[in-house]
Image: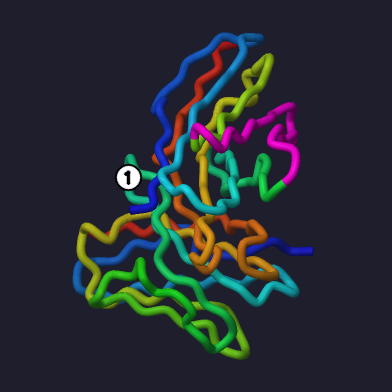
Amino acid sequence: AQSVSQHNHHVILSEAASLELGCNYSYGGTVNLFWYVQYPGQHLQLLLKYFSGDPLVKGIKGFEAEFIKSKFSFNLRKPSVQWSDTAEYFCAVSFSGNTGKLIFGQGTTLQVKP
Amino acid sequence: NAGVMQNPRHLVRRRGQEARLRCSPMKGHSHVYWYRQLPEEGLKFMVYLQKENIIDESGMPKERFSAEFPKEGPSILRIQQVVRGDSAAYFCASSPGQANGYTFGSGTRLTVV
């Protein structure tokens, strides 16, 4: 079955620390990859997406992600987090032939201490 | 330019009642997706609709749940005879086409008491 897994459920960092959130998916075919962020009390917002081309994708707010096809991974990174990055982060994958629906990971709650 | 509008934001229903959740997509978007987020879980796909058509309902529970996206008006997710296990956040997303990535609404938080 097609699935997406996020390795870290809860991450606590101090401001200025570097962040890497893992995301792996199970499917070996063509995929579109997304990271969404949900700030407390708000809706999901798109951070970045990968459809094709350069596997290193730059997103908003200083986030980036790297698609490594051989590892079925799409890890999210940020060199220096801020308190305002405290939120829940979701990796999502759209698999080819799946009508555009997204399969989401379980989410990672990031808490940044000032 | 309004985003995806969902209402109500919060909905409380007693067991056995009906819940109707509404979603107005972004202007120009004709594809609507519904997702459910249960406590402590990620979002799960429920249904994908285009105007007047259900394209993919593989994530919908077999009973009590239905969805529509009429020619005029918002998309409606309807839950009949709600049970406590239906308590969740229901998110709608719209897109101009398949696999483009979409814009999410703020969600409707349904509480069944």
Instruction: Tell which of A109 and B55 is nearer to you.
Output: B55
Quick check: can you spot residue A88? no
A4 magenta-colored: no
* Residue drawn at (79%, 64%) of the image: B1
The reply, left or right, for residue A39 in relation to residue B95 is left
Q: Position of residue B79 (x, y in %)?
A: 32, 74
Residue B70 is at least partly visible in this image: yes
How many numbered discs, if any?
Answer: 1
In the image, B63: left or right of B52? left
Q: Quadrant of the C terminus of chain A?
A: top right
Q: Position of residue B93 (x, y in %)?
A: 57, 62
Residue at image mark 1: B39
Front residue of this view, candidates B81 and B56: B56
Where in the figure is residue A105, as x and y percent of width and height?
43, 42
Q: Tell me where residue B54 appears, x and y as whole percent.
A: 47, 82
Q: Work out whether A30 lies above or below A10.
A: below
- The answer to whether residue A56 is magenta is yes
Residue drawn at (74%, 44%) of the image = A53
Q: For the point 56% across and 9% down, which residue is it?
A: A14
Q: Which residues are magenta?
A: A53-71
Name the residue nearer the viewer: B101 or A10: B101
Vertical placement of B67 versus A29: above or below? below
Near mark 1 (Cα within 10 A), the count class, few <14, some 14-19 or many ≥20, is few
Q: Secondary structure at mark 1?
A: loop
Q: How did the renderer colour the structure?
A: rainbow
Q: Outermost residue, right direction? A: B1
Q: Identify the subunit bearing mark 1.
A: B
Q: Is residue A26 above or below residue A108?
A: below
